[in-house]
Amino acid sequence: MAQAFAIEAAAEPLVSVVIPTYNRAGVLYYALHSVMNQTLQNFEVFVVDDASDDATPELIEYFDDPRIHYIRFATNRKAAAARNAGMSEARGKYIAFLDSDDEWLPEKLEKQVACLESLSDEWGCCYTGAFVNKVGGLTRHRIYRPRRSGALVRDLLKGNFVIWTPTFMFRRSCLEDIGLMDERLVRSQDVDFYIRLLSRYKLAAVPDPLANIFLVLNKNLARVAAESRAILLAKHSELIDSLGFFSSRYVYSMSDMIQAEAFMADGDSTAAWRSFRTAVARNPFLPPRRYAAFARRVVSSMLESRRRGTA
């Protein structure tokens, strides 16, 4: 049985939690349970169902908690639209994102709220550490502990650190300055949102790993990712170019290299090597880890092709 909660919905919740979901009833239970288990209980939750055809509605009824609000799309509109629907309804002082296949540790909201409450409004957002699990293709497990804080938009553009969406919290008042997510972006809509936010506000770090993140290798999305990345780079080209000649070329080169990895993971070696050559031509002095990641993708692709040939 699900745990019964006698807590009424707060008139003014401190935190609004936004969970987009699509056909993930099997794991959404654990995501919601991790929210209900938070040590900070003054929250509201918006589960935004992107036109699922599974048991998601029944799962929400099963929880039977007045703090959970269910928004269902009639047609599939993707993650940016789902998060926007939740943010548009949010009443909390802070907004936190959680993906429906990830989980929070119990003190996640409490520690982030304490962090932001101790800082001035120029610190608009906060991120935490995480246990990151990559499943599919190249499987890795690692603990991510963020150390960077402050005015970090340049570092974000250059890929010097990463913000995992389920570790993120920001002041709802920031939306007045930056607006909602860009629904043109099927992928990378979160990166675009962070760039706009960090262009105006400082980012605080809570190094503790306070989320369990499960990354599954999604096949056949490389071209969709490439289209979104092209929109993203064009949208922020002025900001990127303001970094200077070498730094801006580094940003574009990093993007090409990441795209090369995505194409190789999809089995599109022609597009992968084309992106790789473009990355090297723009700036060959990328971190060794990026070259190593691409090499691992190449080896993985070769082994998969060999397995298919012998099957």
Image (tube, grey):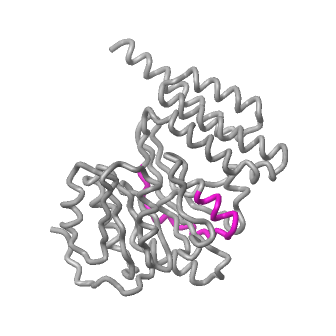
Residue found at the far bottom of this picture: 11
Outermost residue toward the top in this view: 310
Asked whether 206 falls inside the magenta stretch, the response is: yes
Q: Where 2 sits versus 110, above or below?
A: above
Looking at this rendering, what residue extends furthest in the left direction? Answer: 1
Question: For this view, does 253 lie left or right of residue 172?
Answer: right
x 31%, y 76%: residue: 67
Report the side of 22 relative to 140 (left or right). left
Quadrant in which residue 43 is drawn: bottom left
Q: Position of residue 173 (x, y in %)?
A: 57, 76
In reply to whether residue 267 is colored magenta, the answer given is no
* Whole-percent x, y for residue 155 in the image: 71, 56
Q: Position of residue 261 (x, y in %)?
A: 57, 33
The residues colored magenta run 193-214
Frontmost residue, 177 versus 304: 177
Q: Looking at the picture, tell me which residue is in the foreground, 106 or 23.
A: 23
Residue in the picture at 59% in, 73% down:
176
Residue drawn at x 30%, y 66% as measured from the top left: 70
In the image shown, does 50 or 292 lie closer to the viewer? 50
Number of numbered callouts drawn: 0
Q: Position of residue 152 (x, y in %)?
A: 70, 62
Quarter where residue 226 is shown = top right
Q: Is residue 133 above or below residue 221?
A: below
User: Which residue lies most toward the front here?
Assistant: 74
**Position of 125 compared to 33: left or right?**
right
Please tell me which residue is depicted at 57% across the width and 20% down the height of the picture.
Answer: 270
Q: Considering the image in quadrants, where does the C terminus appear? A: top left
Nearest to the observer: residue 132 or residue 127: 127
Classify residue 309 by image quadrant: top left
Which part of the image, by quadrant, shows the N terminus?
bottom left
